[in-house]
Image: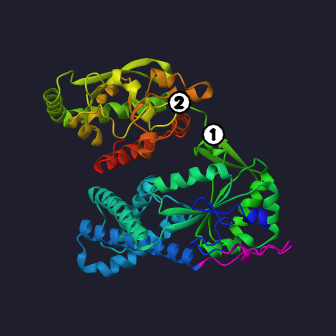
Amino acid sequence: MTPELAAKVAIHGESIAAAPDSPSGLAIESLDVRAGHAAVPGHSVPVSVRRRAALQRRLLGGADILAVTLTVGSVLNVGQHRVLLIALAMPLVLIPFKVAGLYDRDELLLVRSTLDEVPALLQLTALFALGVAIAKWLLGRGALGGDEVAALWLGTFVAIVTSRALARWAAGRLSALERCLVIGDSERAGRISERIASSAARATVVASLPVTAEDIEELERSDAIHQLVGELDIDRIVVVPSTDDEKDIVGLIRIAKTVGVRVSVLPRLFEVVGSAVEFDDVDGMTMLGIRRFGLSQSSRMVKRGFDLVTTSIGLIVVAPLMAAIALAVWLDSRGSILFSQVRVGRDGRQFVMFKFRSMVPDAESRKDRLRADNEAGAGLFKLADDPRITGLGRFLRRTSLDELPQLINVIRGEMSLVGPRPLVVDEDSQVSGLDRSRLHLTPGMTGPWQVLGMRVPIQEMVGIDYLYVANWSLWLDVKILLRTVLHVLRRRNV
C-alpha cells in the first residue's frame, strides 16, 4: 500500500494520516507497502467471525429443536416420550433446514430478519408435519388425522418463527457489533454508514478506504488489506464499486474474500433492477432474467382483493376508536375533524386524502414561514417539532392514529394499504422522467420509505419507491404492514 493510498483510510470520518494517534491504535507504518508482496489466498477466518457464526447457528438449531419438540409433545400428547421425540426431531428439522440454507444465510447478511424466512418456513414445517405423520405410521403407532396434521403444521410454524426471532435477538445481545470496513466509492461510503446505523443491522462502519483502479492493482500485489483488517479487528468488508469496469469490480471482491472475513457487495445493477431476478445458466454462462416492470392484471386483482378484505375487517375493528378520536379532535380545538389534502395518485390522477386533523386550522398559511427549518431534505417538507401541531395532534401523530381515515381512501380505490408515498401536487411536480414510474402503483397508507423511518431527499425517496414497484409481491406487502405495526407499537411515527 502506497503512502498516498494509506492516507485515504478514514476511521469515523477522520484520516489516519492526519490522526496517527487514533483510538483504533492503527499504525499506518505497520502496513506492508512492498510492491510485489503477493496477498496469500485463503487466509484463515478471524476467531471473532467464526465464534459469531457458530453462536448464531447453535442458537437457531437449538431454537428449532425446542420448538418442534414442544409442539409435537403438545399436539400429539406424548410428553413421556420426549427423549424419543428429540431424537426424531433433530434429523427431521436440522437436515432439511440445513439443506435450505437456514443456518448459513445469517452469516451472509447484515440485517437478519425472521420475516424474510417465513415463506420457506411455511414449506419446511409442512414437510416436517408430513414426516412426523409418516414416521408415526411406520412405527405402528397409528395414523394422524387431518386435524392433527394441520395443528402440527401450524403449531410448528408459529413456534419456529417465534423461537427463531428470540434466538436472533439473543445472538444480537450476546455478540458485539459487527465491525465493517467499506472499500470503494467514497461518495457512497458515508450513506452506507448512515443506512447501517439506522437499520436493524447489528453492525457499525468503523473505517472506509476509497480506491481507484490503480489502487486495486496495488492492493492485489500487497497484503495491506489483510493487515488493515487485523489492526482494526474487522468482521466484514463492504465492497462498493466506484467503477463499472468488470475487471476492477472482480478484483475488489477477490481482495476482500482472500482476507477471510464476511463480504457484502453493493452492486449498482440492483439499484435499477431490484432483487426480483432469476439466475439463468446458459451453457455455463450466468445471465439474469429481469421481471418486467409493474404488475400484471392478475397481480393487481390480488393486491386489490387483499386491500378490500383487510381494510373491511380493519374498519369494523377500529370504528369505535375512530368515533372516539373524532370527538376528541372536535373538543380539543374548534375546527374540522378531518384534514383533507389533494394528493397525486396512480397514473398521476389527483385525489383527496383524509386524515384526522392534528394541526391548528390555519396550518397551511403558516407553512411558508417554517420552510427554513425543513428537515426532510430537498423537495419534501417535514418538521420533527412542528409548532402548528396541537396537543392531541402530537399524540395522534406519534401513534399514527391520525392516518386511520385513509382506510376510507383504500375502500374507494384511491389508495392501497401498502404502496409508494402519495405526494402533494408541488412535491410531485419535482419528480420527472423515468422517476414517475413510481406512479404505476396505487399510493399506500404505508410503504417502504415510511418503514425505513428516514428523512431523505425526494430523489432518494422515489428511488426507494421504484424498487418497491420493481420487486412487488403480496408477501412484501404483508412484511411492510407487520413492520409498520412494530414501528407504531414503538411509538415511532411512520
Q: In which quarter of the image is the C terminus?
A: top left
Q: Residue at x 56, y 28 (%)?
A: 437
Amino acid type of the residue that numbered disc 1 sits on in the rendered structure: Val
Q: Give coordinates of residue 99: x percent, y percent.
A: 54, 66
Q: Which residue is drawn at 51% across and 26% down?
A: 439
Q: How many marks?
A: 2
Q: Is residue 142 visible?
A: no
Left or right of 335 on screen, residue 252: right
Q: Is residue 274 visible?
A: yes
Residue 272: mark in rendering: 1
Q: Give coordinates of residue 175: x percent, y percent.
A: 45, 72
Disc 2 designates what residue? 438
Q: Give coordinates of residue 264: x percent, y percent.
A: 61, 59
Where, by quadrant of the figure, is residue 36 drawn?
A: bottom right
Report if residue 267 lies within the magenta region.
Answer: no
**Range of magenta residues:** 27-46
Q: In which quarter of the image is the N terminus?
A: bottom right
Which residue is farthest bottom? Answer: 83
Q: Which of 337 and 410 is in front in this view?
A: 337
Report if residue 44 lies within the magenta region.
Answer: yes
In the picture shown, does residue 11 fall above or below 422? Answer: below
CB under 8 Å between callouts 1 and 2? no
Q: Residue at x 48, y 33 (%)?
A: 299
Which element type, helix, strand or loop, lies under badge 2? Answer: helix
Which residue is farthest right? Answer: 36
In the picture shown, does residue 300 fall above or below 52? Answer: above
Which element type, helix, strand or loop, lies under badge 1? Answer: helix
In the picture shown, does residue 415 fall above or below 38? Answer: above
Give the mark nearer the N terminus: 1 vs 2: 1
Q: Nearer the viewer, residue 269 or 230?
A: 230
Amino acid type of the residue that numbered disc 2 sits on in the rendered structure: Arg
